[in-house]
Amino acid sequence: MSDNPKTIEDKLGLLAYRSDEKSHITVDQEKFKADPVKAILYACPAKVYVEDPQTGECIVNYENCVECGTCHVVAPDYVNWFYPEGGKGVHYKMG
Amino acid sequence: MDEQFEVLIIGAGPAGISAAIALAKAGVEVVVLERGEYPGAKNVYGGILFTHQLEKLVADQMEDAPFERAVTRRRFGALADDREVALDLKVGSWREKPYNHTVTALRGRFDRWFAEQAEAAGAQVFSGFMVSDLIVEDGRVVGVKVQPGDEEMRAQVVISAEGAQAFLARKVGLMQPQLPQRHMITNVKEVIGMPQEKIEDRFLCEPGEGVAMEYFGEPVKGYFGMGFVYTNKDSISIGLGLTVHDLIQSKQTLNDFLEHFKSLPTIRKLIEGGESMEYAAHMIPEYGYNHLPKMSMPGLMLVGDTAGLVNGSVYHEGTNLATGSGLLAAETILEAKEKGMDFGTGEALAPYRQKLEATFVLKDMKKFRRMPDFFNKYPHILRDYPTHVTKWIADYFTIDETPKEDVEKGILKSIKKDIGMWKFATEMLRIGRAVR
């Protein structure tokens, strides 16, 4: 029996990425802080968005993005998501 | 860059490549821009490819296409707690060509191959280039802006096969500026490696043949969505999706849903011992016929997911609507060109919508036009019915010394208690009307 990945973090480890130095995502921190639900924290299937327990700000781990686009449908008011530059970002082998 | 191409296509998925092949074959100069490192590197779907339009485009190459398995068995199940009630279809003729026009395929392999067919037909496919914007002059799309490099490329017609996000279509006002939470479905999928023989034993199929299984209820815990299990050659695709609206309500991650689905007694044994190979996420635009974007404007046409061309209903078709719309977009351009029209004008491109309406693409979506709104309006149907109906059926087949007559009376009593006779009858009618 193999020990298959169960957590999002472990599953992201299965993926190949072409690294991009600059983030393709920006978050309006004030609006994020003011959002009582903060659904992007769980709606993103790659856990790109993490709340900093100290500052309450949203940390954006854009390198993990699997490019589904759910975040800006969830929070169009404060998540600005666009594709990474051509050739960069997640690199699916099967899809 | 002042060069002007005849047709420029954004995105090397099935919709864009279908248009590219049809145009290139007719001698039109076509350029396809793909943001992935190769066609398919960004493309994700559940796993079923419907091939009836492909056969029109690449008839001679179908034998070489990197399909995984022909789908000779389909299963539609309702899952709840510890039980499953399913409609299981095995049809002998599906085992022969054209295999009910239903195969499994992995997009990383298929899209790459399909784009090669476009190149062989004379199209130019450039990978690693992301279109960041459309260039609009006097109300007409005349080209695109490309990253990296901030280059401009001009064309007489641009076809956007950008995909579900439809950034460019939203930007030029062909659809609402924001994607609708109740109609965008986020899916996650895992591809789990497994030896071929094991798949054939487990799923009761012959070599080269496979299964498509789709489940309502428990996989998405009663929310608006479904789970699926598809067999590839030496792997299994398992996943699920639900609307963004319901995902927000659920307060859970899609991976939580997926792990729950994988752990269900009826599903666990199917994937046991397999090795996870890839995790992926993607969105499906299930606007339905009543909420479609405008299909074209001067110089621009929308195809595939960009245009919301998905027949959710019970069929879960997407790839054939994509390929079909690509073909019809190409046909529209070719007819305008033939007539000597300036084929990037509004009049030249307007027949595209009529062509979609006249074929299965919009005929089917129109038939099921009430469904997406119906399930959003009556969320309890997907939430409660799989639980109740599977319980009634399980009770009916439960063996003990209770006389069968009493069993039946008990079930009637359950229907009254769980839903109510009158409500049950009216809701059955409503469901019937929604799919009529």
Image (cartoon, coloured by chain):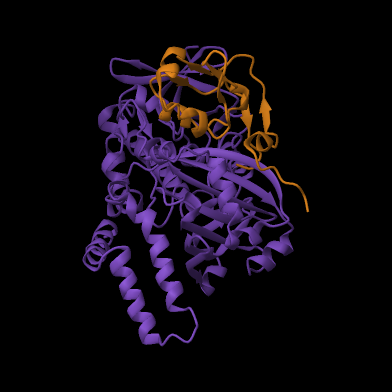
Chain colours: A orange, B purple
Q: Nearer the viewer, residue A62 or B219?
A: B219
* Closer to the camera in the image, B208 or A69: A69
Q: Does residue B61 appear in this view?
A: no
Name the residue: 21% across, 66% down.
B422
Q: Residue B409 at what x, y percent from top left?
A: 33, 80
Task: Judge by depth and name the residue closer to the eye, B111 or B224.
Answer: B224
Q: Quadrant of residue B322?
A: top left
| Horizontal and vertical percent position of residue B129 | 56, 23
Quadrant for residue B59, please give it.
Answer: bottom right
Quadrant, the C terminus of chain B:
bottom left
Q: Position of residue B109 (x, y in %)?
A: 64, 44
Please say if B359 is above or below B283: below
Q: Please name whichever residue, B413 or B324, is drawn nearer the observer in this view of the structure.
A: B413
Q: Is residue B212 shown left or right of residue B406?
A: right
In the displayed structure, B330 sits above or below B1; it is below
Left-right relation of B207 to B146: right
Quick one: which residue is furthest to the right in this view? A1
Inspect this view and state whether residue B305 appears: yes
Q: Position of residue B132 (x, y in %)?
A: 47, 19
Classify B414 as above or below A58. below
Q: Is residue A3 above or below residue B72?
A: above
Number of numbered callouts drawn: 0
Q: Residue at x 50, y 69 (%)?
A: B88
Q: Residue at x 63, y 70 (%)?
A: B204
